[in-house]
Image (tube, rainbow, N blue to C red):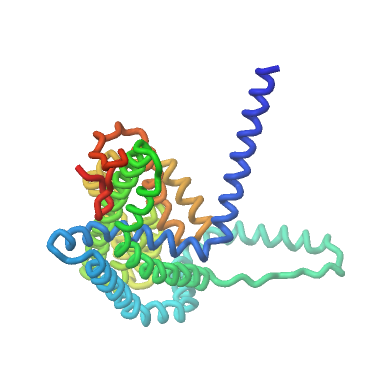
Amino acid sequence: MKPSTTSEAAVIRRLVVAILCLLTVAALFFAKDLLLPIVLGAFIALALSPIVRSLDRVGVPAVIAAILVSAVIGAAVLGLFIGAGDTLARLVDNAPAFGEELRQRLEVLIRSFKTVKDATQTVEEIAGDIETTDVERVVVQQPGLVVTAVGGFASAGTSAAIGMLLAAFFLASGRDLKRMIVNRLETHGERRSALHAVEGTQRLISRYLFTITVINAALGASVATAFAILEMDEPLLWGVAAFLLNYMPFVGTLVGVTSAAAIALVTFDAWQVALIPPLVYLALGTLEGQVVTPALVGRRLEINVVIVLLSVMFWTWLWGPAGAFLAVPMLVVVKALVEARAEEKPAVPEHDDAGEPEVKADGTARA
């Protein structure tokens, strides 16, 4: 009876875990508008925390440093969006004409599919003759691809703006939050483990996000410079797009190369010349992904490619474009937490009178 009881308990435990996972996914999906700005704010704060710490070392108070850094970054991002606003509006307005011009340039490829299209229409006509005449067909008009994409990124931009505001508060009160969490634990072992995990995870995530942001900025500057030399329209906008898209593994490079190819086909008359911009974008993206990032990020934060792809698919489905931006940082958080738990615990810090490790004002244990 005991083995059977143990087996049944294990099955029940697995079912409970599965139900909790499903409920968590459902909660993440339906609470997107609430959770997304908070998560974005937390990651923005982690990315900017090295700058705040550097200012703190030279005597700038943490609150003042957080406000200054957040204001400068927010103003820079706002300026970029304002500067690119007219261009984006013009692109959206000219999307139908652009699509028609692109279709004409690709007429040769379209003709190669004409035979398949004619055969499909013939089959549809035969099927239509078989259907009864009193059946009404309902066609739902879907929004265009450009409108859908712009709407998705606009929603993500709103969440990012709120997240930037929250990041300022996180940066200003990060030490207090960490000290409050650690000091609420009861035993010495819990305090030591929690402090070690929090500090290690925060250090790894902030270093990763800051490094990736610098790499993406360098990639954006390279793309903008290359496209300016190649006489592509709006090279600055291409640089900003490359900077943002590179936060999304696989998807970002694919979207960038495809967009560059489409614009180049309309911009240049010779198709041989039109192939140069997407190939340059692909070369720069490949150099960044295969050489620069592995060299600067290091092997400790390397994650299996299949897991990264699955994470991008899951978070994109769950939270849209913003989820694609957060897919890899989410994996890095999980990896850092697991490694922090698995690492050997540090030496026991000095104890206060109650026998518990003291936490300094900056949220770290006293040496």
Name the residue: 33% across, 71% down: 269
Name the residue: 24% across, 51% down: 360
Compared with residue 24, is residue 240 higher up or lower down, i.e. above or below? below
Instruction: Count the marks.
Output: 0
Residue 323 is left or right of residue 342, and the answer is right
Depth order, front residue of 292/158: 158
**Which part of the image, by quadrant, shows the N terminus?**
top right
Q: Determine the image quadrant of residue 255.
A: bottom left
Q: Position of residue 177 (x, y in %)?
A: 35, 57
Q: Position of residue 363 (x, y in %)?
A: 28, 52
Q: Looking at this view, name the residue that lies furthest to the front.
A: 353
One can see residue 271 in this view: no
Q: Position of residue 43 (x, y in %)?
A: 36, 58
Q: Looking at this view, name the residue that lies furthest to the left.
A: 58
Residue 145 is left or right of residue 43, and the answer is right
Name the residue: 39% across, 71% down: 161
Depth order, front residue of 211/189: 189
Compared with residue 357, is residue 255 higher up or lower down, i.e. above or below? below
Depth order, front residue of 180/161: 180
One can see residue 91 in this view: yes
Compared with residue 342, is residue 139 higher up or lower down, i.e. above or below? below
Compared with residue 13, is residue 27 higher up or lower down, i.e. above or below? below
Residue 260 is left or right of residue 146, and the answer is left
Name the residue: 27% across, 63% down: 220
Depth order, front residue of 365/46: 365
**Which part of the image, by quadrant, shows the C terminus?**
top left
Residue 221 is left or right of residue 101, and the answer is left
